[in-house]
Structures are given as C-alpha cells and as structure tokens.
Image (tube, rainbow, N blue to C red):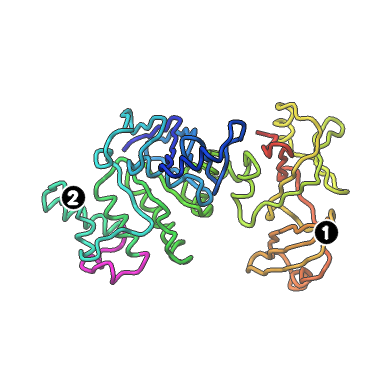
Amino acid sequence: MASLTLKNIKKVYPFNGDDAKKSKKKKKDDEPEKKKVNLQITDEGVVAVQEFNLDIADKEFIVLVGPSGCGKSTTLRMIAGLEEISGGELYIGDRLVNDVAPKDRDIAMVFQNYALYPHMTVYDNIAFALKLRHTPKDEIDRKVKEAAEILDITQYLGRKPKALSGGQRQRVAIGRAIVREPKVLLMDEPLSNLDAKLRNQMRAEIIKLRQRINTTFIYVTHDQTEAMTLGDRIVIMKDGFIQQIGTPQEVFNHPYNLFVATFIGTPQMNLFENAKLVKENGKYAVKLDKLTVELSAEKQEKLAKNNVQPQDIVLGVRPEHITLEAGLPGTVDVSELMGSTVHLHVTSMGRDVVMVVSTMNMTGAEVAALANGNAVQYNFPGHCCHVFSKETGINLEA
C-alpha cells in the first residue's frame, strides 16, 4: 500500500522531423501558442498534460475525469511507467520513480479492452503474473481462488475468455491485477465497453472490491456518474490542466468554474448569462429578469470575504434545484416522465431551461398539467445559486 505524490508533472509529445519543420514555417515570432484538438501546441511539441500536482493518500480512491483528449489517460500511463514523464516528479511512497521500469513500480493496471490471453483459461489468466514471479504453486492456487471468490467468478475458472460476457471478462482482468497485491491499482476506463446495466453492476462490484483489498486506487473515466459514485476525491481535467480537485459533494455543490459546473451533474446545470449580482440592504442577491433572490448566509459570507462587488454575472442553477412556484414564467416544450421525476424543457426569456421535478407528491392531474405547450412558473432558492464571473468564468465564491 502506498501514497503517491505528483509534482508539476508534464507530458509533451515531441514533433517528428516533418512536424517540426511545418511548425517553424508557420509560426511567427509574435504569434501566440496554438491549440488544436484540445491540446496546446508549442515549439517543444504537443503538450498533453501540464502543471499536474496531486497528493494521493494511502488506500485513497482517486478518479481522474474529463472529456476525451483532456490528458487523464496520459497521466495514468505516466504513473504506470508506460509513458515517459517530460517534466516534474512522481513519487510512490517516498521513492522517486520517474526512471523506474513499470515492472519495478509495484503497480497493476486494468485496461479498457481487458487484455486477456485468449488461449488461456480464466485460472491461468489470473495466475499468469504470479507464475512469472515463480510463486509457489500452492500460494498461486490460494490467491487465484481468493480473487475468484471476491469477484464471484469461481464457476468460470475453467473457461476461456471467449466463453465469457463482457462483465465477466472485466472481472477476470481485475482478478489478474489484485492477485499481485500491488501498492497501486490503476484502472483506465474499465467499464466503457459494457452496457448500462452491466456498468451499474460493475460499479457496485468495484465499491465492494475497494472495501476488501487494501490498495490505493486511481481510476480514469469520462463518465461523471462513475466519478461521483466511486471516488473519495475527483480530479476534473480539461486541456491537460486540473480544473478542480475535491470530494464528489464539493465539486457538485461548489464548482470552481463554469467548466466544472456544466461537466458535473446530469442534466447539465442551467446557465443564465443575463443575470446580475446586486446588494440590497447590505445583502447579496441575484437578479434575473423580474425575479430577485437573496443568497444564503454561507454565500453571503464567502462573497463578502472576497470583497465581491455588484456586477453582471453568469448565474448557475441545477435542474433539480428549480421549483414550480410563483416566479419566472415559461412554456413547456418537452415533458419527459421518468417515473418518480419529470424532466421539463421550458422556454423562458428566449432560452431553454431544464428542470427536474419530483412527482412523488403530485396527483395525476398535476402531472398532466406539465404537458407540452402548458404555461408554468418557476423559482429557485438562494442557497442553490452559483454566481460566476462573466469575464473569467470562475465562481465568485471561490
């Protein structure tokens, strides 16, 4: 078991000869650095990850999450030793491992595509790494059977991978990793090839697994639901930079900027760009069209501490925090009944506003009144308002 420290980690993919010539030919002295496909391009090459700083505690479950091309898998591969670190320092425990071979880092990795040996049985796939280490046969047998029991694949030990479902293959891949009892277990989008039902089941299995083995987990995904349900802390990335680090609740309730606010949460947070932050009787409030909402005491304190002045803002309100009561008018465009909730797309102030409304205490007539084309009014409480700078996109409470 081990802690990890990443200090100013950077990854640059150098140009090959032809790319370098093209870059020099096109770039003028006063021309700014360019971006292409979400990655920064400099004279050194394509910068995939930069200024990555993170301390991971022993046995912590960390999730790296972000859109495709944000650098999360590259970061994981640098930790594994599969990618060379261009700059910075990586410590596993107190040991600097920048130049240590992957096999000597005491880590194990679970890949997106399972990477099982098709000609071997499940038993032999799980036992393979132990056999390479010349582990005694009785110990191999004990560890393989223990892992199979933890993952509920004992009945499949004699089968080959082609006879297994996707979820079963992923369990075998995880079993092969955990029998080595690594200090760090790396998982690179392990559930992305599974259907929705299997993903839900495997998420639960990974949570159970985490409780049964004493290992530090680093998990990469682009699925924010996986990030929110699995991680002790989430590292949200964009364009090679960390945007925010925090617990699932912290990043949901206190997003650092507009990117985090819209990336975390389903449906996506509503953003109102025509809002104002005002001060009335010494209290901060948000004003949207004819509606004025006083902010909560916690938000008052943070804004006052930052000496935030009244200004035009981008107001963020999550769909589940909007209530159907006297306030702003709108017209229902789309009504999606989802069982215990109804998702409404409402046209208001010339834009689409999404709401998630609970139907638990509604009568059938009240639910029917939310049909397409009907008029509604909506409001939201002050403790659920997120105020972002129009200029920087940063949360003014941060």
Residue named by callout 1:
377
3D distance between C-alphas at marks 2 and 1: 64 Å
Of 76 and 216, the residue lying toward us: 76
Q: Earlier in the sequence, mark 2 or mark 1?
A: 2
Quick check: can you spot residue 246? no
Looking at the rendered structure, the kind of residue marked 2 is Leu
Q: Is residue 29 left or right of residue 82?
A: right
Quick check: can you spot residue 309? yes
Looking at the picture, does residue 372 appear above or below residue 315? Answer: below
Q: Is residue 288 left or right of residue 9?
A: right
Mark number, residue 130? 2
Mark number, residue 217? none
Q: Position of residue 305 (x, y in %)?
A: 71, 26
Of 162 and 196, the residue lying toward us: 162
Q: Give the residue at x 44% y 33%.
A: 9
Looking at the rendered structure, the kind of residue marked 1 is Gln
Q: Which residues are magenta?
A: 151-167
Quadrant location of the C terminus in the rendered image:
top right
Looking at the picture, does residue 360 appear above or below residue 2? Answer: below
Q: Is residue 132 left or right of residue 354?
A: left
Q: Circle 1 sits in a helix, a strand or a loop, which is it?
A: strand
Q: Circle 2 sits in a helix, a strand or a loop, which is it?
A: helix
Q: Give the residue at x 42% y 33%.
A: 6
Is 160 a magenta residue?
yes
Is 237 a magenta residue?
no
